[in-house]
Amino acid sequence: MINLKPEVVAQLERVLGSVEMLLPRAIKPVDWATCHAANWRRHSFSGYLEPVKVTDNTRLEELLGVEKQREIMESNTKQFLKGLPANNALLWGSRGTGKSSLVKALLNKYAAQGLRVIQVEKEDLIYLSEIFSAVENEPYRFILLCDDLTFEVGELSYKMLKSALDGSVYSAPDNVLIYVTSNRRHLLPEYESDKIGGKFVNGELQQSEAMEEKVSLSDRFGLWVAFHVFSQDRYLDAVRLCVEREAAKRGVNIPFDKDLELDAIQWSHDKSKRCGRTAYQFSKHWVGRYLLAQS
């Protein structure tokens, strides 16, 4: 037996403690039979899938103003669940218009048929191959969701996602689709200077190399689904639905009168936005104030 000096033992303990901090957490595999969603959690040089409880109970029929988008995404997801050809999808457009809510509503409707969702942050896209390996042999269908995604030119995670969509060595297994939401159609900032360098070839205007690079990622999504701000009538329909839901949770009935309508319109003007998120936030304000006045 080797007798070590106390200071050497103390030093070894510090080294072992530091190494232990770098190791992944000891965590049980996700039980996908009971867990419908998970997040990828980075840890040191790798990461792990962390089960999350689905608390958003939004139903597809409650998403107003996005009927066409809902039809496209539901059809694509049903194809995927049946093992038929289906596309990765980019849901892009104005903030608060229901892009993320649509994906959550799809999970709520089709979880019983084997649909599962894994949410991944932009910085963790470099671990795509590890995430794919963790689920490729599972008997479920996974949507890998990257929410509110934007890139700057040259980011490593941009290149990894591009490779995965392109069918390279990092390509997704057959039981995984990638759904991305973003405010930007091409996921990258666009500048006026990007248009410089375009030229005519055989009578047609060809994009500059800068623009070609910026559209190269979004081009790899089979589906582009655009979301736009609501008309005022559609916004008021959303307000009515949100107020009814908030009131029903508390067992009360709140009339949709002229005062409520005018207040909702003013709220949208203050927010400079007519969308589902604005309607939801207003409903919290109105119902809470109404109930406070009754107490």
Image (tube, grey):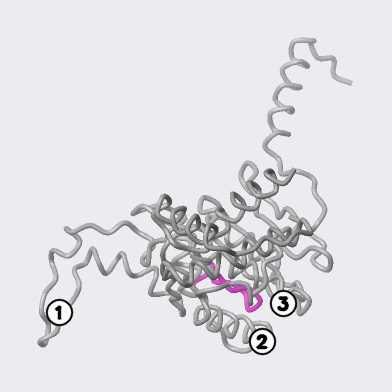
User: Magenta stretch?
Assistant: 168-178
Q: Element at badge 3?
A: helix
Does the stretch in magenta take in 33?
A: no
Q: How far apart are marks 3 and 2 (CA)?
A: 14 Å
In the picture shown, does residue 29 fall above or below 77? Answer: above
Q: Three-letter amino acid code at disc 3?
A: Tyr
Residue 153 circle label? none
Which is more toward the observer, 284 or 63?
A: 284
Who comes first in sequence, dot 1 or dot 3? 3
In the picture shown, does residue 276 fall above or below 207? Answer: above
Q: Distance between the residues labelled 1 and 3?
A: 44 Å
Residue at x 13%, y 63% (from the top left corner) = 196
Who comes first in sequence, dot 2 or dot 1? 2
Which is more toward the observer, 4 or 193?
A: 193
Q: Distance between the residues labelled 2 and 1?
A: 40 Å
In the picture shown, does residue 235 fall above or below 287? Answer: below
Q: Pick the quarter of the image with the N terminus.
A: top right
Image coords of residue 50 (percent x, y)? 73, 53
Residue 110 circle label? 3
* Mark 2–mark 1 CB contact (< 8 Å): no
Does the stretch in magenta take in 169?
A: yes
- Label 2 Cα crowd, 10 Å radius (few <14 / some 14-19 / many 20+): few
Q: In this view, does 113 lie to the left or right of 41?
A: right
- Find the residue positioned furthest to the right: 1
- Label 1 Cα crowd, 10 Å radius (few <14 / some 14-19 / many 20+): few
Q: Is the magenta stretch mostly helix, strand or loop?
A: loop
Q: Element at badge 2?
A: loop
Q: In this view, does 226 lie to the left or right of 200?
A: right
Q: Three-letter amino acid code at disc 2?
A: Gly
Please name the residue that numbered disc 2 is placed on: 83
Residue 205 circle label? 1
